[in-house]
Image (spheres, rainbow, N blue to C red):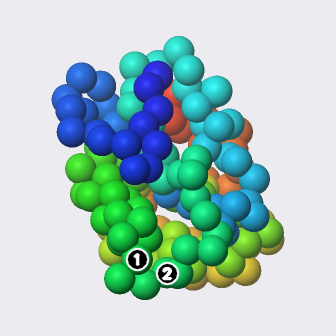
Amino acid sequence: MKMIKAPDSYSNLDEFKSIFLGGSIEMGEAENWQERIAEELKLFKVILLNPRRDDWDNSWKQTISNDKFREQVLWELRAQEIANLRLYYFDPNTKSPITLLEMGLFNDKNNIVCCPDGFWRKGNVEIVCLRYDIPFVHTFDHLFDWLKIYLS
């Protein structure tokens, strides 16, 4: 397993399958669930594209004129475009508007969605997944099982 975090380069992804780790971050408020994924998949030949940036600064203005913010958003969009699989996780303790946006932009069968009970828009997420035939799971345990089958 290799993890590439924003804003690091991910130009050579042909070696292994790649998974974009989209989901709740909420400016650092959500649990670091990406590390749980990495630990669970540590023995697999996979590249994880993790948008959780180590040097994120909550004081950055989220505007197109902010170079760091623009770099982050463009990194995430390109990573989603080129990843073999996009994983979207909705933490029940967050609103995750950007994850909802991203799932809407990339609503195809190259996704897996994990949305536990308690997420404020779980019904919307389930309906979109059903409508577009996107694999959907309710728990991390089921997500891990699904990912291990996908990577085997």
| For residue 65, side relative to residue 3 (left or right) | left
Residue 20 appearing in the image:
no
Q: Quadrant of the C terminus?
A: top left
Q: Amino acid at mark 1?
A: Asn
Mark 2 nearby-residue class (10 Å; few <14, some 14–19, many ≥20): few
Q: Secondary structure at mark 2?
A: loop
- Residue 6's place in the image compared with 150, above or below, is below
Q: Secondary structure at mark 1?
A: loop
Residue 28, image x, y percentages: 70, 61
CB atoms of marks 1 and 2 within 8 Å: yes
Residue 134, image x, y percentages: 42, 60
- Residue 131's place in the image compared with 71, above or below, is below
Mark 1 nearby-residue class (10 Å; few <14, some 14–19, many ≥20): few
On the image, which quarter does residue 73 sit in? bottom left
Closer to the camera in the image, 80 or 84: 80
Closer to the camera in the image, 27 or 95: 27
Labels 1, 2: front one: 1
The residue sitting at 39% across, 31% down in the picture is 47
| For residue 65, side relative to residue 55 (left or right) | left
Residue under numbered circle 2:
62
The residue sitting at 42% across, 66% down in the picture is 68
Distance of mark 1 from mark 2, alpha carbons? 7 Å
The residue sitting at 37% across, 43% down in the picture is 8
Q: Amino acid at mark 2?
A: Gln
Say the numbered circle drawn on residue 47.
Answer: none
Residue 28 appearing in the image:
yes
Residue under numbered circle 1:
66
